[in-house]
Each structure stands twice: as C-alpha cells, then as structure tokens.
Image (tube, helix red, strand yellow):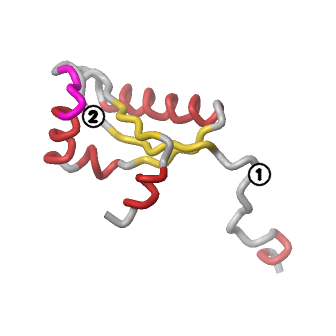
Amino acid sequence: MSEGAAIRSAAAVILFCPLRALDPFAVGRRFYRLWLELTAAGLALCPLSAVADHEPSRTALEERYQVPAERRVANALRVGVAPRAPARSARLPVEELIV
C-alpha cells in the first residue's frame, strides 16, 4: 500500500463503527462531527475510506476488532498530532490571479 509508511507512523487508527440501522445521511453527519471534534482537539486526521469500501478488508477488520453485529466499519481514520503552524496554502495569491 502506498500509504503504508504514513499509516505505520500514525499515532492511531480510528475505526468509525456506527449502527447498521442508521441511514447514510446520519452516518455521514456523525462521521464529519467526529472529524471536526477531533480536529478541534488538536489532532490531524486522514480518512482511509478504501479500507471500509472494500468488502473483504471491512469484514476482516470487523472480525479482528470484534465489532458487534449491530455495528459496521463505515470508515477508518489515521490520526496524529496536528502541526502547530498552519499549513501554507497551495493557492496563488490574489494579486497573481487578478490581472
């Protein structure tokens, strides 16, 4: 996996396991709320959506981490401490865009 080094160096990987009965909108809302709360706590997160989207991988995770039958792995996030300085924007400055 091309992200292997980044995953191995992460402080943690979080499995997001909502109730299977929740509709996709509610699952998405909870997922983004969790992401925002962890970011506000000073953490940097990167979703590993392919792990949850790939059925054999998702099933293996649910079995390995004993996810209760009423829940499912909907996503995974690698987590680390956010850098103190804000990231520099990759966008061009306004002065260079407007002619």
Is residue 20 something that shows in the picture? no
Write down the quadrant of residue 94 in the picture: bottom right
Quarter occupied by the N terminus: bottom left
Determine whether the residue tagged by mark 1 lies in a helix, strand or loop. loop
Q: Magenta span covers which residues?
A: 64-68
Residue at 16% from the left image edge and 21% from the top image edge:
69
Give the camera-side residue of 34 and 7.
7
Tell me which numbered mark, 1 or 2, is placed earlier along the sequence: 2
Q: Which residue is mark 1?
A: 85
Is 88 above or below relative to 29? below
Q: CA distance from mark 1 to mark 2?
A: 33 Å
Where residue 15 appears, x then y in whole percent? 35, 34
Is 90 above or below relative to 79? below
Using residue 77 as the reference point, say whether residue 74 is left or right of it: left
Residue at 27% from the left image edge and 21% from the top image edge:
19
Q: Which residue is mark 2?
A: 73
Write down the quadrant of residue 82 in the picture: top right
Where residue 87 appears, x then y in whole percent? 71, 57
